[in-house]
Amino acid sequence: MEDNIVWHDHKVVRSQRAENKNQKPCILWFTGLSGSGKSTVANALDVALHNRGYHTFLLDGDNVRHGLCSDLGFSDSDRVENIRRIGEVSKLFADAGLIVLSAFISPFNSDRRMVRKLFPAGEFIEVYMNTPLATCEERDPKGLYQKARAGEIKQFTGIDSPYEIPAHPEISLDTSSTSVTDCVESLMNYLLDRKLITT
């Protein structure tokens, strides 16, 4: 079947789509344990960028599993496929000229490298939510750690499934000691310094 599939080049290219929006496409990939602040900080950054007139889209782990990845579980192979799909969707949004924010535990370094390779140099920004496990477990906003400790949830990242810490993330944030406002300021400054945004 693959022999019958041919890539169709678009007449309007990604640079033109981005130019229309007066911005440069990129992806901020928020990774970290459940409860580390990925979705909270990503949402706050999304609001800050939107208020400045930037065109963004936020992809969140739980939301995506309601639709695009509703057929996947939490085995290692399903986690890989989950991130592969998100990477491809994120690339499409970036090709449309958007600033993409993706908030996923994405526990494996190999998966995050796979997504990074989909983007031109400098466009993939790995944001490691370096919040200690103890803080994440204390927060436990969804009650998942309690269930994992009780054996009700298997293969839960940080408990009985590993989280591989990024070796060289572009940004590292610890929400146990840094406010959401300060996290957003750090992210905005990073984007400004690299001229991905201008205001």
Image (cartoon, rainbow, N blue to C red):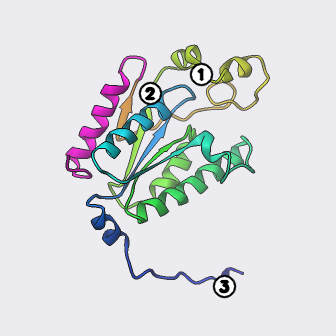
Give the magenta-colored segment's residue range.
Answer: 175-199
Q: Secondary structure at mark 3?
A: helix
Label at residue 141: 1
Give the camera-side residue of 166 and 79. Answer: 79
Residue identifier under label 3? 3
Q: Secondary structure at mark 1?
A: loop
Q: Nearer the viewer, mark 1 or mark 3?
A: 1
Give the residue at x 32% y 54%. 122
* Disc on the earlier residue, 2 or 1: 2
Instruction: Give above or below for 140 relative to 72.
Output: above
Residue identifier under label 2? 130
Residue 140, percent across and down?
A: 60, 19
Give the residue at x 62% y 47%. 64
Give the residue at x 42% y 22%. 175
Is 45 inside the magenta-drawn segment?
no
Residue 59, percent across and down?
A: 52, 47
Residue 26, percent across and down?
A: 37, 54
* Disc on the earlier residue, 2 or 3: 3
Give the camera-side residue of 35 and 20. Answer: 20
Q: Give me the C-alpha separation between circle 2 and circle 3.
A: 45 Å
Q: Is residue 153 left or right of residue 86?
A: right
Q: Secondary structure at mark 2?
A: loop
Snapshot quadrant of residue 120: bottom left
